[in-house]
Amino acid sequence: MARIVMKFGGTSVADVDRIQAVARLAKREIDAGNEVAVVVSAMAGVTNRLEGYVREISRLFDLREYDTVVSAGEQITAGLTAIALQEMGVDARSWLGWQVPIHTDNAHGSASIAGIDGEAIAARLRTGEVAVFAGYQGLDPDRGRITTLGRGGSDTSAVALAAAIDADRCDIYTDVDGVYTTDPRIVAGARKLDRITYEEMLEMASQGAKVLQTRAVEMAMRHRVPVQVRSTFDPDTPGTLVVDEDSIVEQDIVSGIAYSRDEAKITLTRVADRPGVAAGIFGPLAQEHINVDMIVQNVSPEGDATDVTFTVSKSDYDRAIKLLEEKKESFGYQELRPDQNVVKVSVIGVGMRSHAGVAQTMFRALAERGINISVIATSEIKISVLIPDEYLELALRTLHAAYGLDSG
């Protein structure tokens, strides 16, 4: 017997037929003798519709009331899933975030989970009851109001619940059948990974891979919760296990190649090259909650000035440009050169820790294809480059082949 958390995203519960299919998958695990908790998202498109209603009424809305409105989608799905299970003869009960309770901070709209007391839920699972949870929801610490965890928060709910009830595994059911070496829609030779480490999955998620939400991977890594990515529509096919590095016998040097189109490049030319200048630029951006990712400086031959290039997300781009233009005199740059036609490509693998030449392979392969690199950033298990967006598909195919990742 195993204790399993099964999480189903919006496409998996898009309508009544799919909700009934989800219930059948949960019943199959119960029939196999397992204890099961189910976490559901809102039906596909519902959260967007609810958010649209809020924005129709107010542009500067109260986030506490926003959470009240948009959390309703998961409540509906949880109730319908419990009813579907009951119709199949399964003892099931729905649970909302405040009923568990799932304690969060008070950052409405993007709350973080502070803790879950899982003992009462675990006791119910031991009796054979299926607990169906509304994902994405929590309870604030001040006035007991509903909070939401931000987009993709149902993944985080599922992993946090799995940790709280000491589950053997957390299965994330989605519309893909696992984690691939790169986007199979672009690279025909992309192959599904049987296993991937938490660290690699975290880098892939943060660098643009949409399979798992970044915070969910962070929580799984912190609590060592094994996570399996599976397809709702092909449930008999094994998925990809996200596990601790020690659980993988032999690591590939490179496990995958991720990309993000959510990047905009900004260059400030002829900035005075003196101590404190970088802090003077990036401090005001941070105060406006504008996250800066990749950074590079090029000092002039005279040594008196430098060009500063960095990237921000496209959602922050307009605010960043406005701030930089308003502060041109205090920042002391000569020219602002914005560029939204860029894409970030990242090579990821824990094997990089013990193998040299990974960066050289990347740079040589791109150079041979005439792809110019404008910014480079590295970590222990990742190398990211910024390139013109028209070269994305060519870069992915080139790098996938260069690292021997093509299937067959």
Image (tube, rainbow, N blue to C red):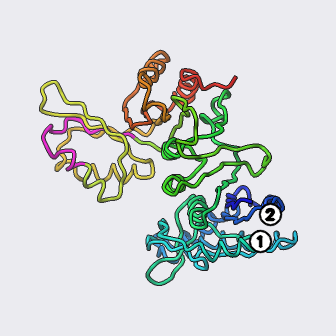
User: If you read the primary sequence from the N terminus, does the residue marked by circle 1 or circle 2 appear first?
Assistant: 2
Residue at image location 54% in from the left, 77% down from the top: 146
Provide the residue designation for mark 1: 128
Give the amino acid type for the residue marked by disc 1 in the picture.
Gly
What is the quadrant of the N terminus in the image? bottom right
Q: Are marks 1 and 2 in contact (CB under 8 Å)?
A: yes
Q: Position of residue 149 (x, y in %)?
A: 52, 65
Q: Position of residue 64 (x, y in %)?
A: 49, 76
What is the quadrant of the C terminus in the image? top right
- Is 287 or 179 nearer to us in this picture? 179
Residue at image location 30% in from the left, 55% down from the top: 286
Read off the magenta span: 265-281
Q: Is residue 116 visible?
A: yes
Q: Residue placed farthest to the front in the image?
A: 1
What label sits on residue 30 in the rendered view? Answer: 2
Q: Secondary structure at mark 2?
A: helix
